[in-house]
Amino acid sequence: MRQSLGERLRLARLAKGISQGELASAIGVSRTAIGQWELNGVQPSLERLDEVSRFLDVKPEWIAFGVSDTPDSSEANFVEVDEVEFGQSHNEVFPKQVWKLPFGFVTHELMISDSSPIIFRVSNNAMAPELTSGDRVIVDRGQSVIDGGLLLIWNKVAACVARVHANPSETEDSVRVVLGGQSIDMPLGSVVVLGKVVGRIRSAES
């Protein structure tokens, strides 16, 4: 049976060799709160999970969902997801490695059911601080609606992650591509939507 959030939190704390009280003091909560988290009585917020993971030197995705780039292959109910890179066009897709994500995380947390998701590694800081170099995004290839959300796109040069807004004009339909603080209006046909970003796996360095 897959471990619960509380069990993973306890394992990470014990591996670090610290008490509940020491962890509580480090992140500014009560020892009782840590105890409740480990007993699965109360779920910590995402912000608290991020603080805990940084202090314990583990990925927040592992504590929250059991997501890991080195999963226990004996655990059942995992979905294999390819991490990919692109060549000279969006049709040139090269698998880099295979991740195993919990089935429940993919179907219930990310709400992916009918399409095969992919993982894409961010290679620059254009979307910082939201995404930084080394972060990976989980992309639902079945979603391609341009609604201002975070999308994986092909911009005729390379694949990149950006916020894309519909930007109709009198002369030509266009989209507004937002990379960090920079906005670029581009003809609608020049942007290929490869999928919607539905999750992030933070780099250990970010």
Image (cartoon, grey):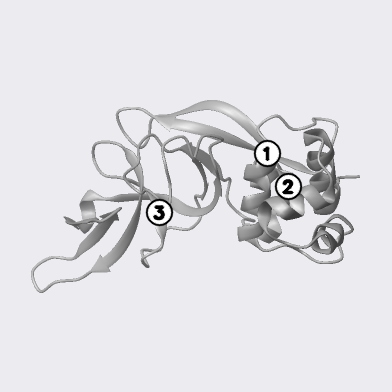
Provide residue 13's location: percent of width, then percent of height.
Answer: 80, 42
Task: Give amino acid for label 3.
Answer: Leu
Q: Quadrant of residue 170?
A: bottom left
* Mark sitting earlier along the chain (1/2): 1
Task: Give amino acid for label 2.
Answer: Ile
Cα distance, mark 2 to mark 3? 26 Å
- Nearest to the observer: residue 144 or residue 10: 10
Quarter of the picture containing the N terminus is top right
Residue at the limit of the structure toward the bottom, as seen here? 170
Cα distance, mark 3 to mark 1? 27 Å
Provide residue 203's location: percent of width, then percent of height.
Answer: 53, 37
Q: Which residue is mark 2?
A: 63
Cα distance, mark 1 to mark 2? 8 Å
What's the residue at 38%, 30% (across, down)? 92
Q: Are circles 2 and 3 on residues that touch, CB within 8 Å?
A: no
Question: Would residue 40 be seen by someone viewing this image from the given angle?
Answer: yes
Instruction: Report the side of 156 relative to 199 (left or right).
Output: left
What's the residue at 51%, 34% (across, down)? 205
**Would you call the spot at circle 1 few (<14 residues within 10 Å), some (14-19), or many (20 or more)?**
some
What's the residue at 83%, 53% (across, down)? 6
Q: Is residue 19 above or below residue 93?
A: below
Instruction: Report the side of 43 relative to 126 (left or right).
Output: right
Provide residue 147's location: percent of width, then percent of height.
Answer: 37, 68
Question: Would residue 102 be seen by someone viewing this image from the given angle?
Answer: no
Mark 3 vs mark 1: in front: 1
* Mark sitting earlier along the chain (2/3): 2
Q: Which residue is mark 3?
A: 151
Q: Are circles 1 and 2 on residues that touch, CB within 8 Å?
A: yes
Q: Quadrant of residue 53?
A: top right
Q: Which residue is mark 1?
A: 58
Provide residue 30's location: percent of width, then percent of height.
Answer: 78, 62
